[in-house]
Image: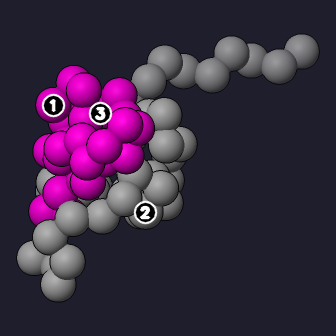
Amino acid sequence: MSKEAFMSVPQAAELLGCSDVWVLKMLKRGDLQGFRLSGRAWAVSTESVERNLREYMQRDRTHAGRPRAGIG
């Protein structure tokens, strides 16, 4: 576990390589843990971000997505 227990939405987005909006969606879906500080500010669990990264790295990406369409 990292030194800090919580991070901001922009920090989580940078680590995950996505937008702030996507982090908020992940929080609302329960993919990330955190809590609302006030208004629009959230505290995101560092542990849940690290867990999400580990799970992403462990996925078998050989069959992910659909094949690209041919050009031409």
Residue that badge 1 annotates: 30
Q: Is residue 11 visible?
A: yes
Q: Residue at x 40, y 51 (%)?
A: 9
Residue 5, by quadrant, is bottom left
x and y, in percent, of residue 13 in the image: 45, 52
Is 69 in front, or is 2? 2
> Mark 3 highlights which residue?
26
Q: CA distance from mark 3 to mark 2?
A: 14 Å
- Labels 2 and 1: the sequence-earlier one: 2
Tell whether 23 sits left or right of 66.
left
Secondary structure beneath dot 3 equals helix
**Kind of residue at disc 1:** Gly
User: Could you tell me how far apart the alpha carbons at marks 2 and 1 are, in whole angstroms?
Assistant: 18 Å
Q: Is residue 54 magenta?
A: no
**Disc with the residue nearer the chain's start (3 vs 2):** 2
**In the rendered structure, which segment of residues is drawn in magenta?**
24-47
Disc 2 marks which residue? 11
Residue 56 point in image, percent of width and height: 27, 48
Q: Measured along the vertical axis of the image, is residue 50 above or below residue 13?
A: below
Q: Residues within 10 Å of mark 1 (few under 14, many from 20)?
A: few
Determine the image quadrant of residue 62.
top left
